[in-house]
Amino acid sequence: MIKTIPFSPPDISQLEIDEVVDTLKSGWITTGPKTKKLENEIANYCQVEKAVCLNSATAGLELSLRLLDIGEGDEVITTPYTYAATANVILHVGAKPVFVDIKKDEFNIDPTKISEAITSKTKAIIPVDFAGWPVDYDEIKDVLENKKHLYSPKSGTWQKSFDRPIIIADSAHAFGATYKNKKIGSIADFTCFSFHAVKNLTTAEGGAVTFNSFPNLTSDEIYKKFMLLSLHGQSKDALSKTQAGSWQYTIEIPGFKCNMTDIMASLGLAQLKRYETELIPKRKTIFEIYKNELKKNPKLILPPFVSETKTGSFHIYPIRIINIKEKERNEIIQKLAKNGISVNVHFIPVVMHPAYTKLGYNINNFPNTYNMYQNEISLPVYSKLSEDDALYIGKTLIKIIDQI
């Protein structure tokens, strides 16, 4: 009988169930005390002053752009090797996405290409910690420092608190990763995490933004603005309004509806308790099994997950198969499926999708991105994947590649 191995189911234990039930019984299920507690715990975990929890990483990215008044006439540099959300938020605020290629042998953005793309219109950079492997933050900061004479912040905005383009990291995959012994979340100006169902730490949907204070701009001010933006600009949240005699509120700005609920936060609180002792170690074990099994085959390029300066979050295991094209890659995926193994491809580059080709973007301008994409396959990685199944996946993959 053929095994059936899914790609990335969530790991929900009795701890998560009990925490959610406790919330349901509490009589308070929307944004409230558990969301605030999760924010504090995420800030502590990431070693920053503040965290704000929202309904998605996408909301975190977009609201970060909006609180900095990035919009019409501005440019934001990012990578085409990412999910569409990274670029969509730039369009949502009216700014222009400026895509630059990734490194020749790595899925992350190339800092030298960032340097070539910076103009006086550049207000922010959105690098992506692909698969949970951090970008080269110091290299990016050096580039921005060297080009800071081009930075032209809008008067009367928080852009004035920066002397170079602002780094808004898309670290959707990278919760728990480190760069030079610092937690991801504490390195970029703003860091956006995803807690979607397939992520290492999940709240079903959801996300968070982490940040510190800046010159002439405190983390408390930033947090308050995030709260306004995420709740229609309302001066009081639902919990504050329910206090006796506190029903009155004002709408300070025309905001949005992006808040996290206490039900979601309950999942996050339980997951965070298990994260370093259970969830991450199990994922690391899967990475090590794949590495030991797949390194035997010279046709495979395996991803890094620990180096002198970086530790990944063990979120995605993206392999590359030497000297094959999309057609052969897709055949391998189908053969794996026939053997009960669900895999994925991360990602179809943003500039290959109709929404972006219609805007004039062309994959031919990003050769490294296409070369990495055309032979990439992401293998299943999740904390409930058994070691036997991981070995089965590795051996089956090698057998199929040899056949192809």
Image (tube, rainbow, N blue to C red):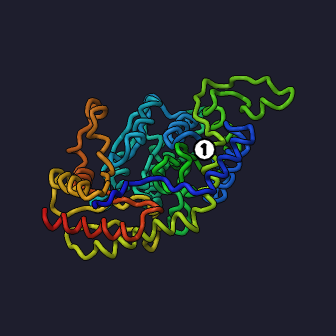
Question: In which quadrant will I find the N terminus?
Answer: bottom left
**Residue at 46% across, 59% down:** 137
Say left or right for 348 vs 168.
left
Disc 1: which residue = 264
Tell me where residue 322 sits by quadrant: bottom left
Count of picture labels: 1
The x and y percentages for residue 291 are: 34, 72
**Residue at 61% across, 56% down:** 14
Residue 242 visible in this rendered orientation of the protein:
yes
**Residue at 27% across, 33% down:** 354
Reply above or below: 260 against 277. above
Q: Nearer the viewer, residue 279 or 372?
A: 279
The local secondary structure at tag 1 comes to helix
The x and y percentages for residue 243 are: 83, 32
The x and y percentages for residue 260 are: 61, 40
Using a 10 Å C-alpha cutoff, classify the residue at mark 1 as few (fewer than 14 neighbours), some (14 to 19) or many (20 or more): many
Q: Nearer the viewer, residue 342 or 105?
A: 342
Say left or right for 76 vs 223.
left
Say left or right for 231 vs 295.
right
Say left or right for 69 vs 2.
right
Hey, what amino acid is under mark 1? Answer: Met
Most extreme residue toward the left, as rendered? 404
Tell me where residue 3 sits by quadrant: bottom left
Most extreme residue toward the front, as rendered? 1
**Residue at 33% across, 71% down:** 391
Q: Nearer the viewer, residue 114 or 349?
A: 349
